């Protein structure tokens, strides 16, 4: 069976800088894949290519066998959703409204129906609201739906971003540093949440600097260094690989 | 509530007494100043406003939330009214001999009141439970009284003919609203209006329909409000573009112009290039559709830009429209424009003629006024229903963070084009009616300044709300009309009023909840 996400030779060049260099990466159904690497290794640039925010200079991205290209909303509709390293919620909308926006690409009501308010409109709104309420409860914000997003605590904002991404019913969720700025307890909760997301049938790719978080969570880990993939393997393999240690700490001076 | 120590009341009591006495005394040493200011014994002209603002001194003995700021607002309002009139009296009376002792006494009294208010303890802010909640009868009465007060203020203001007195009136209304705002009245009313929305809308609609019947056949204000109606439809359309989707369009009046030209060309005007006559209803829709197509044509290449860049490019397209209309003699008759557009007629009913209804003779403009009301009602339905749907949510999401909106699965280009087309459609519909109302269409009516005025109406009224667009377009239309006697200083005053409003209420007169959150940290969050 072919993997859910097939990345082949993706390259992203900004002017003179090679941010992503011929990266191959697969994410299978029900997998949690980690992407690690030192600062500036191209992790977020890779995610931007995978979510359609940046067009890769070269290479192909296939999702469920279909070639992905074009604007970000096409990627989301195809089933790749993401969160951002620096949280990007709609700050003046409530938590509930934020999740409702995530439903946009799975709802159909058009101009005439929105103005005419037929039974289809009401049915779809009810479905969306039920779904949004369920997702808020799922990420642990069940009672905060009416709070304006920017008034939520930092950890809750990260959880809300995940709920919004899940609202688009993705097959693959890209998480860009989901535990940045969290304490140990919140980090554990986030790891549990990611496992629950996987159990819902959503594959997850996650960028993170926290090694304990990554190695405790992921089925497979890819290490990016200066844009290219240095190593890929199980957490144990990656942890024991001398090239990874060298990339992070520098070569031992003998 | 409790009474204060009498010692703290002496200063404001003296001030209130002086202000009352001063307001009942002559303010001018010469005859001819509006409000019979040279005569004493009655509060004529701006003196009435001072007398009403004295009511604010009751706050010195009643302890309620926000009273310091409210008392201060009332007292400063009196200071401002007296001060403005002093300046006018000195100006028109030829120096310091112009104002009489009553004016100086009033100024002293108002000053004492302000000083007393300044010395009040800061106290707590107004809380929602300062005001009665529930019993349905109280709520219904409050909504009705609130609407009546608004209408009363409008009718009162319209009846003031002298510009100087109108400015005093504006200052009075402004400071009174500030005082009531600090007492929490408007927060309370907002909640009530939201809870009794249907009733408020029905009452407001009824008042709007009743308005022409109150004018006793006098066409002037009916005509003004018919013009405002045209403007208001366009403002609601622009509110979709700017208020909801957050796209700053500085060439919006071009869509209005497209509609006007379509309306004029298809009406078989006396001086025109096209000699066809199409039924009016079809023309309104056609004008809207043509404008919407223009919106798509202009939007498709420009909507990839954001913020300031979009504003500049739309400004350019607005000018292109005007210059094209000015030079395309074969279709638009160039700078002469198309004139002699006949009155609307539908099934033997001539919209230009006066008609009698319920024993009241309504001038021809009343018919246009009712057409405008129908258009406004339609625009309101479209605006509110779109706002409260996945389309409206997507627009707001685009305004808040376009990248996040796109990553959340929103086709941003398509939705921005939709906002542009709907806004243009509304402006086009309004334009066709305007062609008939003004009987002529020429390029100089669609200048950059008109676009700016429309944007100002939306921003001033409050982005993203219908009452905001209505209030903003009314204010922007009535203010210049009322300030006419200031002639060349008119635009200066107008600009000053806008600056003041943006300083003290940047979110606009009637902001949407969301918009309010962007400007105020203390804005109440909706109940979960």
Image (cartoon, grey):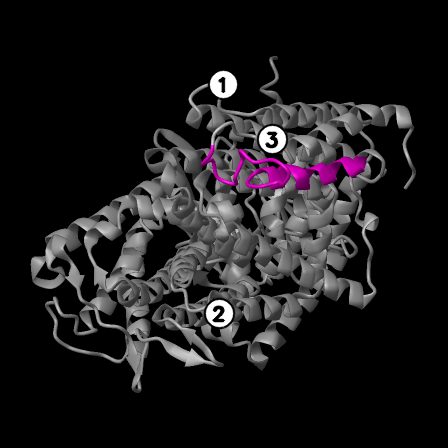
Q: Please name which of the two marks, 2 or 3, marks the residue nearer to the observer.
A: 2
Residue contact at pointers 2 and 3, CB within 8 angstroms: no
Q: Is residue A234 visible?
A: yes
Q: Is residue A7 visible?
A: no
Q: Circle 1 is placed at which residue position? A: B96
Characterize the local packing of mark 1: few (<14), some (14-19) or many (20 or more) Cα atoms within 10 angstroms: few
Quadrant for the C terminus of chain A, please: top right
Viewer-side residue, B414 vs B14? B14
Viewer-side residue, B23 vs A143? B23
The numbered disc on residue B377 is 2
Q: Quadrant of residue B337?
A: bottom left
What secondary structure is found at the residue carrying circle 1?
Answer: loop
Characterize the local packing of mark 3: few (<14), some (14-19) or many (20 or more) Cα atoms within 10 angstroms: many
Q: Chain of mark 1?
A: B
Q: Which residues are magenta?
A: B31-59
Q: Are discs 1 and 3 both within one chain?
A: no
How many numbered circles are shown?
3
Which residue: 21% across, 50% down? Answer: B444
Q: Circle 3 is placed at which residue position? A: A244
Q: Please name which of the two marks, 1 or 3, marks the residue nearer to the observer.
A: 1
Q: Is residue A214 above or below residue B196?
A: above
Q: Is residue B157 above or below residue B178?
A: below
Q: Position of residue B459 (x, y in %)?
A: 48, 46
- State yes or no: residue B147 in magenta: no
Q: Quadrant of residue A16?
A: top left
């Amino acid at each position: 069976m072919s993997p859910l996400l097939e990345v082949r030779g993706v390259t992203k060049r900004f002017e003179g800088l090679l941010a992503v260099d011929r990266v191959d990466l697969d994410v299978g159904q029900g997998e949690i894949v980690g992407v690690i690497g030192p600062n500036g290794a191209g992790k977020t640039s890779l995610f931007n290519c995978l979510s359609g925010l940046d067009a890769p200079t070269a290479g192909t991205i296939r999702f469920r066998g279909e070639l992905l290209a074009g604007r970000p909303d096409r990627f989301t509709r195809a089933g790749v959703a993401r969160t951002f390293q620096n949280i990007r919620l709609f700050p003046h909308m409530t938590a509930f409204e934020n999740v409702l926006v995530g439903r946009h690409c799975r709802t159909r009501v058009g101009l005439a129906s929105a103005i005419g308010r037929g039974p289809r409109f009401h049915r779809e709104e009810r479905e969306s609201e039920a779904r949004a309420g369920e997702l808020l409860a799922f990420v642990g914000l069940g009672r905060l739906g009416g709070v304006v997003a920017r008034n939520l605590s930092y950890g809750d904002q990260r959880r809300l971003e995940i709920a919004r991404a899940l609202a688009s019913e993705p097959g693959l969720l890209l998480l860009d540093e989901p535990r940045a700025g969290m304490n140990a307890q919140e980090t554990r909760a986030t790891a549990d949440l990611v496992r629950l997301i996987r159990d819902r049938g959503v594959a997850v790719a996650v960028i993170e600097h926290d090694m304990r978080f990554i190695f405790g969570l992921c089925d497979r880990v890819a290490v990016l260094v200066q844009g290219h993939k240095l190593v890929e393997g199980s957490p144990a393999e990656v942890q024991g690989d001398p090239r990874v240690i060298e990339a992070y700490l520098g070569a031992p001076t003998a | 509530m409790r009474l204060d120590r009498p010692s703290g009341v002496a200063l404001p009591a003296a001030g209130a007494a002086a202000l009352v006495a001063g307001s009942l005394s002559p303010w001018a040493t010469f005859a001819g100043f509006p409000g019979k200011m040279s005569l004493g014994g009655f509060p004529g002209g701006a003196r009435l406003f001072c007398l009403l603002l004295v009511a604010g001194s009751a706050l010195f003995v009643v302890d309620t939330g926000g009273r310091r700021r409210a008392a201060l607002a009332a007292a400063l309002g009196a200071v401002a009214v007296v001060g403005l009139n002093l300046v006018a009296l000195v100006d028109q009376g030829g120096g310091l001999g112009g104002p009489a002792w009553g004016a100086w006494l009033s100024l002293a009294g108002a000053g004492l009141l302000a000083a007393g208010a300044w010395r009040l303890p800061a106290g707590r802010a107004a809380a929602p439970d300062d005001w009665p909640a529930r019993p349905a009868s109280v709520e219904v009465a409050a909504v009705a009284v609130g609407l009546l007060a608004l209408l009363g203020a409008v009718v009162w203001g319209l009846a003031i003919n002298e510009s100087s007195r109108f400015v005093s009136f504006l200052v009075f209304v402004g400071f009174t609203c500030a005082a009531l705002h600090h007492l929490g009245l408007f927060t309370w009313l907002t909640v009530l209006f939201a809870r009794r929305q249907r009733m408020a809308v029905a009452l407001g609609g009824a008042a709007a329909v009743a308005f022409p019947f109150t004018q006793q056949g006098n066409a002037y204000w009916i005509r003004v409000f018919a013009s405002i109606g045209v403007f208001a439809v366009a403002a609601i359309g622009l509110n979709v573009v700017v208020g909801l989707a957050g796209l700053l369009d500085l060439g919006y009046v071009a869509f209005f112009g497209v509609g006007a030209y379509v309306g004029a060309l298809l009406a078989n005007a006396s001086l025109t290039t096209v000699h066809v006559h199409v039924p009016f209803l079809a023309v309104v829709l056609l004008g809207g559709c043509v404008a919407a197509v223009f919106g798509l044509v202009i939007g498709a290449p420009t909507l990839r830009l954001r913020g300031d860049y979009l504003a500049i490019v739309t400004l350019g397209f607005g000018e292109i429209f005007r210059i094209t209309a000015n030079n395309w003699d074969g279709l638009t008759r160039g700078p002469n424009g198309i004139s002699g557009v006949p009155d609307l007629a539908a099934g033997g009913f001539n919209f230009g003629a006066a008609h009698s209804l319920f024993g009241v003779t309504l001038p021809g403009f009343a018919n246009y006024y009712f057409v405008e009301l129908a258009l406004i009602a339609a625009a309101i339905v479209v605006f509110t229903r779109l706002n409260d749907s996945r389309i409206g949510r997507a627009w707001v999401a685009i305004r808040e963070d376009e990248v996040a909106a796109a990553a959340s699965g929103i086709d941003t280009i398509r939705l921005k084009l939709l906002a542009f087309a709907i806004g243009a459609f509304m402006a086009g519909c309004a334009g066709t009616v305007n062609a008939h109302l003004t009987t002529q269409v020429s390029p100089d009516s669609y200048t950059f300044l008109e676009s700016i005025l429309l944007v100002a109406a939306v921003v001033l009224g409050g982005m993203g709300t219908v009452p905001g667009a209505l209030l903003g377009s009314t204010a922007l239309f009535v203010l210049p009309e009322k300030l006419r006697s200031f002639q060349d200083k008119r635009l200066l005053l107008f600009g000053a009023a806008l600056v003041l409003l943006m300083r003290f209420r940047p979110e606009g007169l009637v902001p949407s909840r969301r918009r309010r959150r962007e400007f105020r940290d203390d804005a109440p969050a909706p109940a979960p």
